[in-house]
Image (tube, grey):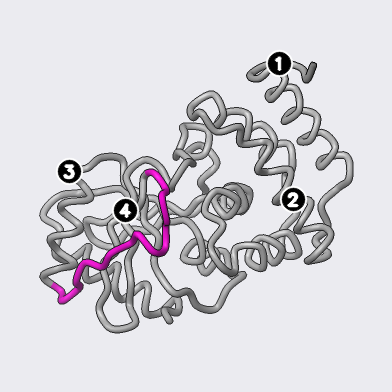
Amino acid sequence: MIDLDKQNQLLSLIGEKLKEKIECYIVGGSAMMYHGVKGETKDIDVVLDDEKSRKILEKILKELGFKERDVRVLYFRKKNTPLLLQRGEERFDLFVKKVITFEITQSMKNRIEKVYEYDNLIVKVVSPEDIILFKCATERPGDRIDASNIIKSFDVDWDVIVEESINQTKLEDSLFPVFLFDFLQELKEDFKADVPNEIIDKVMKIGEEMMEKRYGKDK
């Protein structure tokens, strides 16, 4: 497991070795640690803007002793799977632009308030609302627990979550509000998360309208 101190150490090592400035976006449990709602994480989830940047980070991590692992078991039949690099219990998941089906959009970048510089590595931490959305997209073990903890710790802007789910559907074939509805309903029913009923109803209606538009009404 990786705590915030260890995460800072690893990112500092990368930043020291970089010969040029690279920006990256931190999501998942790694982002939660910066927001103070998680003590440790299994991996550091990093999203980069292009393949060139990912190759540069891959080279540095391999120089530091990290080795590539097969991700097919973790992300079975998923698109946009990460490059997974591991050294002992330390692990990096490197994504480019998208985490599975969820894309880093300009609206998400605009919501970023936490930015850290590790020499040449510029780390931007996504907002709590966007962490919830990423948790919905990946659906790895523990994602629902993490999402419910975020909801308990922050005054979540639910309109942001709804609007971004619509935005993501414009970028992908996936009807994201449909998945978001199931995710939020499970958070409320099984994890007792304080998700407003009107938000669940709103997401359900949006999902139904999208399905009707795409597939037509049942005869």
CA gap between label 1 and label 3 equals 42 Å
In the rendered image, which residue does mark 4 sit on?
A: 122
Check disc 4 and give the amino acid type.
Answer: Ile
Secondary structure type for disc 2: helix
CA gap between label 3 and label 2 equals 36 Å
Front label number (2 vs 1): 1
CA gap between label 3 and label 4 equals 16 Å
In the rendered view of the protein, which quadrant contains the N terminus?
bottom left
Q: Residues within 10 Å of mark 3 (few under 14, many from 20)?
A: few
Check disc 2 and give the amino acid type.
Answer: Leu
Secondary structure type for disc 1: loop
Residue 77 screen position, x and y as percent: 41, 50
Viewer-nearest residue: 154 or 142: 142
CA gap between label 2 and label 1 equals 25 Å
CA gap between label 2 and label 4 equals 32 Å
Region rendered in magenta? 64-79
- Counting residues from the start of the chain, the first of labels 1 and 3 encountered is 3
- Counting residues from the start of the chain, the first of labels 3 and 2 encountered is 3
Residue 100 screen position, x and y as percent: 44, 46
* Residue drawn at x 73%, y 59% as measured from the top left: 151
Position of residue 48 relative to residue 106, above or below, is: below
Viewer-nearest residue: 136 or 26: 136
Residue 162 highlighted magenta (yes or no): no
Q: Residue 61: which quarter of the image?
A: bottom left
In the rendered image, which residue does mark 1 sit on?
A: 216
In the rendered image, which residue does mark 3 sit on?
A: 52
Task: Considering the whole magenta stretch, tell me its main secondary structure.
Answer: loop
Check disc 3 and give the amino acid type.
Answer: Lys
Front label number (3 vs 2): 2
Viewer-nearest residue: 142 or 131: 142
* Residue drawn at x 71%, y 63% as measured from the top left: 148
In the rendered image, which residue does mark 2 sit on?
A: 184
